[in-house]
Image: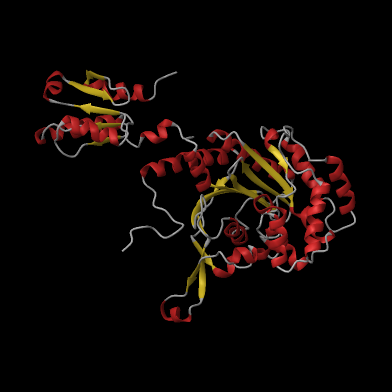
Amino acid sequence: MSTKPPGGTRDFLPEEIRRREYVVRIVRDVYERYGFEPLETPAFENIGTLLGKYGDEGNKLIFKILKRGEYEASREADLALRYDLTVPLARVVAQYQNELPKFFKRYQIQPVWRADRPARGRFREFYQCDIDAIGSASAVVEVEQIAAVNEILTKLGFADFRLLVNHRRILTGLLEVSGIAAAQHETALVALDKLDKIGHKGVEAECAARGIEPQKTTSLLEMLRDIFTVPLDGESSTGLINTSRLESLDNFLASTAYAGAVGELRAIVRLVGSTPAAERVFVDPRLARGLSYYTGAIMEVAVDGIGSLGGGGRYDNLIGMFLGRDVPACGFSLGLERIIVVMTERSMFPATVARGGVDVMVTIWSDEARGDLLTLAAELRRAGLRVDVYPESDKLGKQVKYAASRNVSFVAILGDDERARGEVAVKDLRTGDQQSVPRAEAPQFIARRLNPEP
């Protein structure tokens, strides 16, 4: 039997979990400081909850769970693994509408599943770190989410990222002007979202394969080129790209169902100027975001040479599918796996993360001394230290080598001589230094060297 996990999934060994927990701690801390509250939902949902929320492309990637027991032979599915955290949130808002505050801000850090083709940084099981704000159509909502994401990435050590913004209704208006039928809008947006990866020819080919007339796709791409300046090399200031051209577009859209979309986007960019994220935000006319439930502003994190680390947008109609009336909503999702992969490749994690989960290991000289050594371990733990005890009596060199292999910082040695003097020998494996200290002072001695005062 193969011992490998299923394709697109992974086992997480201790060092990998420490990296994950480091990132999650920073994400959770920032989210909570921005007023978001925690939420968790089940790993699977009723299949009807998920189907029809993500468009045709998304529906194909939902992991379906077949009926069980006497219904197993039907080969029908009644449940499905969670595809994202947004649709379950919409269900929760509808279910608990009378118990939630007027403006509900939640964060959620849980795994999701997609039947996608595994690739570098792309998995079938992966964690998302979501924030969503329910109940307000104000541009302040988008700006706060952009500011939170900017702070998270900055704290994690990223310096080469951009926060791209666009507006779904602007894109829809351009599709309409290009003559693309409403029934083909979803297909066109999915293709357009890949523009930076497959280029104009690739978008044209993908649209043609889906039945969109080539001249209409060409018209759309030419309009994007003419109305916008393609971002973003050399840009350093926050603002709409080609503001005068956007104003012309705004005037044109005033006679359509998409009036005001440019003004909404302009308001977001203007307010972002009041936050530390100002220099990171750019309008990208190519940004489409593939999911069909977006209705307004859309956002994405782009890292040079890497691609997207997350994104989101406004989805004012989604909750209405469950509640029967539309509720303003906007969210942003960070891809935890992609962040960890990039940080690992770039050696961005602090040395303390790689050091390991043990501060000090107590060595054992003889079976007769085990009781006293366990007492020493308890004394060290009471001081807040993470302590391991070597389980067998063995040569000191082997025990020290084992501790070093686990990235343990200190070894505590309590031999016959040390016991007679009431001391503990403490070896710093980071420097190789060894020093004997009074046993009562050993916990504080190690703690001070682990966390020296500035």
Colour scheme of the rendered structure = secondary structure
Q: Quadrant of the C terminus?
A: top left
Residue 105 visible, this orientation: no
**Residue 54, percent from left and from top:** 63, 62
Nearest the viewer among 308 and 330 is 308
Q: Quadrant of residue 4?
A: bottom left
Quarter where residue 146 is shown: top right
Q: Nearer the viewer, residue 146 or 232?
A: 232
Q: In the image, residue 3 lies at what x, y percent?
A: 33, 58
The relative height of residue 370 versus residue 299 in the rendered view (above or below) is above
Residue 190 image point, x, y percent: 68, 59
The quadrant the N terminus occupies is bottom left
* Residue at 68% over, 57% down: 202
Residue located 74% across and 54% down the image: 168
What residue do we see at 69% from left, 41% from top? 143
Q: Residue at x 65, y 58 (%)?
A: 291
Taking the image as shown, residue 208 lies to the left or right of residue 112, namely right
Residue nearest the viewer, comparing 16 with 345? 345
Given residues 343 and 119, the one toward you in this image is: 119
Furthest toward the left, the residue is 368
Q: Is residue 166 left or right of residue 417?
A: right
- Residue 152 in percent (x, y) is at 57, 38
